[in-house]
Amino acid sequence: MTVAVVLFTSDLRLHDHPPLHAALKAADEVVPLFVLDPGIHAAGFDAPNRSAFLADCLNDLDASLRRRGGRLLIRHGPVVRKVREVAAECGATEVHMAAGVTGYAHRREERLREELRGGGAVLRVHEAVITAVAPGAVTPSGSDHFAVFTPYFRRWSQEPLREPLSAPRTVRVPDGMRGEPLPDRAKAAGASPGLPTGGESAGRDRFSRWTRSGLSSYEDRHDDLAGDATSRLSPYLHFGALSPVELVHRARKHGGPGAEAFVRQLCWRDFHHQVLAARPGASAEDYRTRHDRWRNEDDAAEDIAAWRDGRTGYPVVDAAMRQLRHEGWMHNRARLLVASFLTKTLYVDWRIGARHFLDLLVDGDIVNNQLNWQWVAGTGTDTRPHRVLNPLVQARRFDPDGSYVRRWVPELAGVEGRKVHEPWRLPADRRDALDYPEPVVDLADGLARFKHARGHD
């Protein structure tokens, strides 16, 4: 009997899973393996929200495998060592996994390939599993990646996608392979109370329901903060519980302006993956050096604390930050405006904001989180690096009657209409009764500081 190992990483699903499909085709038996790596804990990437969601994903994956005669093998320890041990235990000749783009993923693949070769096994790395189009599959003339989204989107849209693969009917696992207990969501202390249920089953159900109810209107409503009309699929994409290839195919089959707008957002995700694949250092360093003199934790401690706690005095900013803490998720338009407020109005280093997002976001990953923050901060791929999103303009445009603010800032629930966006303009006696802070900075002063610091007076 021939045996292959499938190492699951950020691809926790059975539908459209090329590594699993290839392993089942190449071997009589397959060991589905997930390694809980202590290195992730040491790096601080196993935040409570992601740990809880991951536990859901792994339990759901195990249940799906068991319905097909298999099961998920869990091991704790360094990934390379544990994969090598499992391959030796079952006599595997091949190990299959999805390609990653971060520096950590590249180092993991290199070490795995070397270690497995010494034991007589071969590592097979599969592209276009975590993304719809593999990083590097489309490149501009004279460069290894696209630095601007629009030309990338044009080329990406012309790239033929592989057909999605069906989930396997049967998965045979060798007898005697022993794993460790699956993680328990309940043990992820500190998870947000509004965190959604993770896993492929929940993700597929959410996408099917949203396709019927929200996809057609997505182009017109995706920036509506109170309408909550986005797909909320980002956590499932982050953990690979949904296939981006399958989502693109299904959206295009649905058709219409809403589907086109949704596919464009999936392309943004691929765009960031190809940027980081080519420039791994952008996870921590400015993609484009702007010689900023950012304020840091010592310079702006009170302002940073107010931003994190949702007490800046700007209701739409505070609403978004409180949504983040309660749900482990934030509306995309809100992410842009709170990031602009921190980096440009408060002029705080983007890495401080990115770290806070990674502490709380269930969909927080190095690729999209860091590069989105850089885009807003003006150190990334935005072709207008000096743009500043005025929170009042944003609030009036995307939360015109204040419903989003009143939902997340209960102190202001009694303030009617658009007045909720500028509580400092209310009569003094009414302001005093609100228990809501004054603005941490005047917007004009913040803009002047930003322009001066960047040398654009």
Image (cartoon, helix red, strand yellow):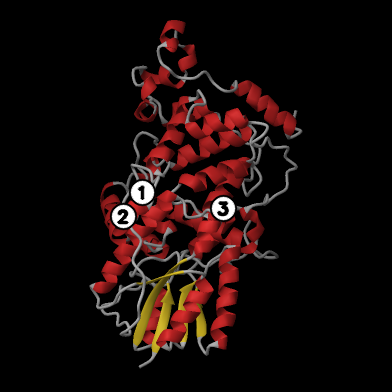
Q: CA distance from mark 3 to mark 1?
A: 22 Å
Sequence order check, earlier mark of 2 and 3: 3
Residue ID for mark 2: 207
Residue ID for mark 1: 231
Location of residue 429 (image quadrant): top left
- Which quarter of the figure is the C terminus placed in? top right
Amino acid at circle 2: Phe
Pointer 3 local density, CA inside 10 Å: few below 14, some 14–19, many at least 20: few
Mark 2 vs 1: CB contact within 8 A: yes
Q: Residue furthest bottom?
A: 1
Q: Residue 103: x and y, percent? A: 61, 64
> Mark 3: which secondary structure?
helix
Left or right of 90? Residue 294 is: right
Amino acid at circle 1: Ser
Q: CA distance from mark 2 to mark 1?
A: 7 Å
Residue ID for mark 3: 150
